[in-house]
Image (cartoon, rainbow, N blue to C red):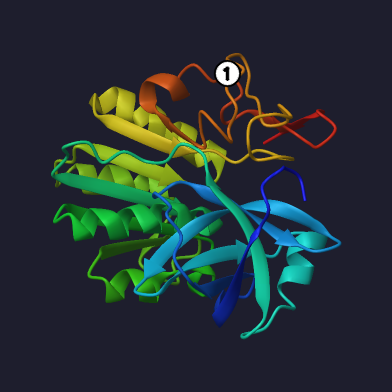
Amino acid sequence: MNNLEQPKIFQITDVIQETPDIKTFVFQGNLSALPGQFVMLWLPGIDSKPISIAYKIKEGFALSVRKVGPFTSELFKIKKGQKLGLQGPYGHGYDLKDYKKIICVGGGCGTPSVAFLAQQAKEKKLEVDFIIGARSRSEIPLKKFLGYIGIKIFTSTDDGSCGYKGFATDRLKELFSKNQYDCIYTCGPEIMMKKILDFAVEKNIGCQISMERFMACGIGICGQCCVDDTGWRVCQEGPVFEKEMALQISELGKYKRDKCGKKQNL
């Protein structure tokens, strides 16, 4: 465990295989979280990692996780009925302001972060369009859930196996040629988000991005997730940054740092 808060224990009521490498873990119990916030998911004797909330249900909530390393490999062994510890929620989330029509862009495993926002926006009677970008049909997460809650979905795949053939950013431009939106909300590969941010500047509309960085504590003490040149902590001032703040982050779309602080080009 990486911080002073004792984890809350929640039971898993369902495990959904979204894609070959993404699972959604559904938990029983209330979690007072806002869209864009995250929890530190704790595996005893292993580690804790930040995970965004994917959506809420009547008596629970869901976390969608991509299998990428030792921690998530162990997590993927967890079954329905088992219990896990969570700390949080933490961080600065999305803000719907007084918008009427928005568009969300989720790239691969970044989709869950904006899915929770789309759910809240729909509950508030906003008009919501949602682009899910992935490499192929088999790698599109949360499509069933988003369709179930009435979100208008536009898929974009690299190989053209589902929906538009090409990048999510190209699909976004196509939709903008036919619609007017108040704000773009996005989470996914940083190069994609940087292109979307630049597009929002060009169109002079709102944009909010959700960043991912290595986090050790999740509560702003360790400084592992600070971004250049601002020193903002992704776990506190982020993970969601509005357009004006995001434009000041010099590393956005270029590089990030590993747990030792070494730069890794994106």
Q: Mark 1: few, some, or many residues within 10 Å (few <14, many ≥20)?
A: few
Q: Position of residue 175 (x, y in %)?
A: 23, 49
Per the image, the residue denoted by label 1 is 250
Q: Position of residue 46 (x, y in %)?
A: 84, 60
Relative horizontal placement of residue 167, taking residue 68 as reference (left or right): left
Rendered residue at 43%/52% (across/down)? 33
Instruction: Label 1: state its secondary structure.
Output: loop
Quick check: 262 above or below 52?
above
Relative horizontal placement of residue 43, taking residue 248 as reference (left or right): right
Quick check: 130 above or below 257?
below
Residue 4 falls in image quadrant: top right
Q: Position of residue 73 (x, y in %)?
A: 77, 68
Q: Is residue 171 visible?
A: no
Number of numbered markers:
1
Quick check: 205 above or below 101?
above
Rendered residue at 14%/41% (across/down)? 180
Q: Position of residue 59 (x, y in %)?
A: 39, 75
Q: Nearer the viewer, residue 35 or 85?
A: 85
Q: Is residue 65 visible?
A: yes
Quadrant of image for the C terminus: top right
Residue 215 falls in image quadrant: top right
Mark 1 residue type:
Ser
Rendered residue at 43%/37% (across/down)? 209
Quick check: 175 above or below 149?
above
Q: Nearer the viewer, residue 163 or 113?
A: 113
